[in-house]
Amino acid sequence: MIALSEAKRLVSGRLDTESSEPLYRQLYDRLRVAILSGNLRPGSKLPSTRGLAQELGLARNTVMTAYGQLLAEGYLEGELGSGTYVCKALPEHLLHASLVRPPVAGMPELPPKLSRRGAALVSIPNPVYLGHKIVCAFRLGLPALDEFPFALWARLTARYWRSKPSHLLAYGDPGGYWPLREAIAGYLATSRGVCCHPSQVIIVSGSQQGLDLAAKVLLDPGESAWIEDPGYRGARGAFLAAGVRLIPVPVDAEGMNFPSVAGKRSHARLAYVTPARQYPLGITMSMSRRLALLEWANRADAWILEDDYDSEYRYAGRPLSALQGIDHQGRVIYLGTFSKVFYPSLRLGYLVVPRSLIDPFARARALCDGHSHIVAQAVLAEFISEGHFARHLRRMRRLYAERQEVFLRAASRDLAQLLEIRPCDGGMHLIGWLDEGVDDRVMAKRALAGGIITTALSSLASQPLKRAGLMLGYTAIDSRSIRDGVRRLAEILSKNK
Ligand SMILES: Cc1ncc(COP(=O)(O)O)c(C=O)c1O
């Protein structure tokens, strides 16, 4: 029989009554550690629950629950109330002090031993900006979340669940829910000139997963990809995480200026582009550059990954059709998202892949996370096919055009001496160009300290920029917040001029 004083010593004195961890759990952990480390020998008898409870100043029930758990897990044997013993038959290899470390609050954790891939992953800046207030001036890339058609979405979702769709509750097709693939193929054909069969549409969990899959399925570690510079950090991250060597390609008035990097050392297996509206500069890739890029892909036996992230938001004129629609050799993988036209946490996007890649992408998706939530896909399919999506888009387009106007009017009054801001015929942000020599990262930091979120253009570039600027998102906030934000930003920037 273990003496009570010895038992008390083994459970390291008093338990922490302030901790959020229940007392029985703390006691269980300490006894378990004492058993595994050999301090409580196999076969030895534990004190009675009543005795130990008194010794430790605990309720008897607490000790009984801890013993009960250890009995259930096979660390103890016998019966509560008539003698409890440390199990004689614990495997020897478990009884090794080095395997167990009592949880000690405040003890520094050793850095985890990660794989090379894991270490590379954590070294890449996270593209999703999580901190600070969710909706505020001038956060990038967020739609008007308060304008979401909540009631309609709720009605459609409820209608689905009420129909008891048990057939949608099992595992589904990794390529996505068929009616949604059909709806997307139809929408892309009429609005973006994308030419595809629904089977070529692969539903993904947002563009980010599409980028991740494309990098893994199409490129080997060490192979190269062209990437626009400045460019989308999410794409950079996905390629770097897949071990791809990135070749930054400057952007000129015609879009990604790949002829400027052509040459042996710059051979690439893939080009990542945002031709509808270059992210972040907002330039539309010219038709001649598009044709040249397709020709390059054919010659170099390479892929083009076309990210069409927000082409829905065009406020004047018609956009150029997608590159995918003029690709006759199956070189283009098209990527779209519902993050900007619906809401980002929905995590639904899509790839349109050449026929030969349908199976490889669907299989890769299956091994990644199976597929996206099927009922959400079904509701979205209905939202599109019943015409609500087109109506929602028209409404948002009008709203964002108005918001851009409000922003420009306020900026011409308050920011004219501080930033050069040109109107844009589409998109969800504007760029405030700074005077030459001004460091945009410093300015962005100061703005943040003053409660305004801006994104330094140089943080999206790997080469020094000719002129620095601040990216300013204006779609998520109402007119009043836009005007207040502009005034505040002007105060901050003029103080630091
Ligand atoms: C260029 C670009 N592509 C894609 C996305 C959307 O990503 P996701 O669909 O993963 O939300 C964004 C969002 O900011 C973006 O800027």
Image (tube, rainbow, N blue to C red):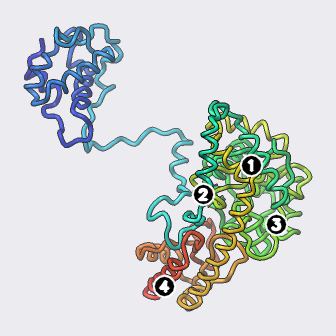
Do the residues bearing badges 3 and 2 touch, measured as CB atoms within 8 Å? no
Q: CA distance from mark 2 to mark 4?
A: 28 Å
Q: Give the vertical position of 102 relative to 131 (above or below).
A: above
Q: CA distance from mark 3 to mark 4?
A: 42 Å
| Labels 3, 4: front one | 4
Mark 2: C-beta under 8 Å from nearest atom of ligand 1: no
- How far across and down, in percent of the image, does residue 201 sit? 77, 46
Residue carrying label 1: 351
Q: What quarter of the picture does the N terminus occupy? A: top left
Q: Residues within 10 Å of mark 3 (few under 14, many from 20)?
A: few
- How far across and down, in percent of the image, does residue 39 sit? 20, 19
Residue carrying label 2: 343
Q: Amino acid at mark 4?
A: Arg
Q: CA distance from mark 3 to mark 1?
A: 27 Å
Helix, strand, or loop for circle 4? helix
Q: Earlier in the sequence, mark 3 or mark 2?
A: 3
Which mark is drawn over residue 487? 4
Q: Amino acid at mark 2?
A: Tyr
